[in-house]
C-alpha cells in the first residue's frame, strides 16, 4: 500500500539565509542528507549511513535549531544521530553547529517530515528517540496535525530497540495529557520517572536545554519532560 506524502504545516523557509549559511547548506547538506530508496517498499540501509558505524543510532524528529542534537553528539562520541527537520533555517543552524564542533561525520539529516523517514527505518534500529517541544496545535480543529497519534506511536514502537528510550517534552499541558493518553493506549512503552515524584517537571542532566524550553520558561510556562522505555517484544 502506498502512503500519501505527509504534509508539513507552516513555512519551510522563513527569513532569507545569510550568505555564509546558504553556502554551508549547499556545500555540506548533500553529504549528510538521507535520500530514501526509490522503491517505496524498501527500507533504509542504516548500516551504510556512516563510514564508521556508530555503537548506537539515535533519532531526533523536529530538531529546531539543532542545539540539543549538537550537544548530544558532543556528549556521546560513540553515537550517531539522525535529525529530521523540514525548515531550512533550522537545518542551516545545525550545520553551522556541526561545522564548529567537527561532529558532522556522526550526523545524518532528513530535511523533511520525519514520519516519511520513520516509515522506511528497519525494525529495532534506533536506540533512543527524541521529540522535543513539537508544535502543540492548540486549537481543537488542528489536533489532527499533531505529531503524536496512534500511527506515529506505532512507528516509534516498531523502530525502537527493546529497552530503548523515547524522550518527549512540551510546555502545553493539554498536549502532555494527549500524549500520555495515546502512549498508554499504544501499550509498547513503560513510563520512566526522572526522579521520585517529580511528575516530569525535572529535566535530566543528560538532556540539554533547547531554545524552545527557554522561550517557554521566559513566558511563564512550565515544561514537562517525559521518558518512556520500549517494552521488550
Image: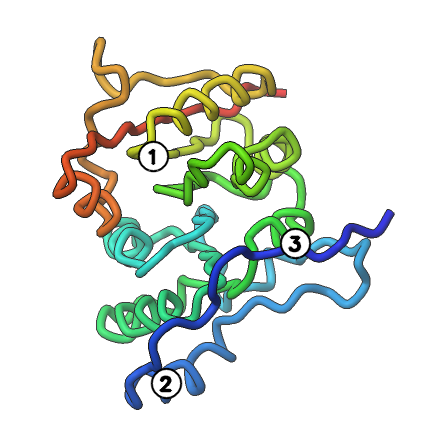
Q: Position of residue 134 (x, y in %)?
A: 41, 43
| Left or right, 67 with reference to 162 | left
Closer to the eye: label 1 or 3: 3
Residue furthest out toward the right = 1
Q: What mark, if any, has residue 169 been given in the picture?
A: 1
Gap in angstroms between the C-alphas marked 2 and 3: 26 Å
Task: Measuring from the top left, give residue 176's x and y in whole percent.
Answer: 39, 25
Q: Quadrant of residue 151?
A: top right
Q: Which mark is residue 79?
A: none
Name the residue tied to disc 2: 22
Which numbered disc flags the more N-terminal residue, 2 or 3? Answer: 3
Nearest to the observer: residue 123 or residue 53: 123
Residue at the image position 63 percent from the left and 20 percent from the top: 233
> Whole-Å distance between the Cαs marked 1 and 2?
30 Å
Helix, strand or loop at label 3? It is loop
Residue 3 sits above or below residue 94 on the image: above
The residue sitting at 59% across, 37% down in the picture is 144
User: Are the residues flagged by discs 1 and 3 in contact, CB closer than 8 Å?
Assistant: no
- In terms of depth relative to the viewer, which is nearer, 136 or 159? 136
Of circles 2 and 3, the one toward us is: 3
Residue at horizontal 23 percent and vertical 38 percent from the top:
206
Return the mark for residue 6.
3
- Are there few (<14), some (14-19), or many (20+) residues within 10 Å of tag 3? few
Sequence-first tag of 1 and 2:
2
Location of residue 139 in the rendering, given as x and y in whole percent from the top left corner: 46, 36
Q: Quadrant of residue 102?
A: bottom left
Callout 2: 10 Å neighbours few (<14), some, many (20+)?
Answer: some
Q: Considering the numbered disc 1 on the image, is that residue within a helix, a strand or a loop?
A: strand
Outermost residue, top side? 197
Colour scheme = rainbow
Amino acid at each position: 500500500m502506498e502512503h500519501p506524502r505527509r504534509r508539513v504545516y507552516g513555512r519551510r523557509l522563513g527569513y532569507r539565509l545569510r550568505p555564509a549559511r546558504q553556502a554551508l547548506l549547499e556545500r555540506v547538506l548533500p553529504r549528510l542528507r538521507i535520500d530514501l530508496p526509490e522503491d517505496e517498499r524498501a527500507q533504509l540501509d542504516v548500516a551504510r549511513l556512516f563510514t564508521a558505524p556508530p555503537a548506537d543510532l539515535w533519532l531526533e524528529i523536529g530538531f529546531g535549531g539543532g542545539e540539543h542534537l549538537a550537544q548530544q553528539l558532543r556528549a556521546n562520541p560513540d553515537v550517531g544521530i539522525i535529525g529530521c527537520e523540514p525548515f531550512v533555517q533550522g537545518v542551516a543552524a545545525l550545520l553551522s553547529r556541526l561545522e564548529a564542533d567537527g561532529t558532522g561525520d556522526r550526523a545524518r539529516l532528513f530535511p523533511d517530515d520525519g514520519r516519511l523517514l520513520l516509515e522506511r527505518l528497519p525494525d529495532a534500529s534506533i536506540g533512543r528517540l527524541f521529540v522535543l517541544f513539537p508544535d502543540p496545535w492548540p486549537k481543537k480543529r488542528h489536533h489532527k496535525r499533531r505529531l503524536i497519534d496512534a500511527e506515529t506511536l506505532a512507528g516509534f514502537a516498531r523502530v525502537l530497540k527493546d529497552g530503548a528510550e523515547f524522550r518527549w517534552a512540551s510546555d502545553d499541558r493539554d498536549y502532555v495529557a494527549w500524549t500520555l493518553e495515546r502512549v498508554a493506549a499504544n501499550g509498547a512503552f513503560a513510563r520512566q520517572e526522572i526522579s521520585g515524584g517529580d511528575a516530569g517537571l525535572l529535566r535530566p542532566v543528560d538532556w540539554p536545554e533547547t531554545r524552545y524550553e527557554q522561550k517557554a520558561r521566559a513566558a511563564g510556562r512550565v515544561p514537562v519532560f517525559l521518558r518512556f522505555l520500549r517494552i521488550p517484544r
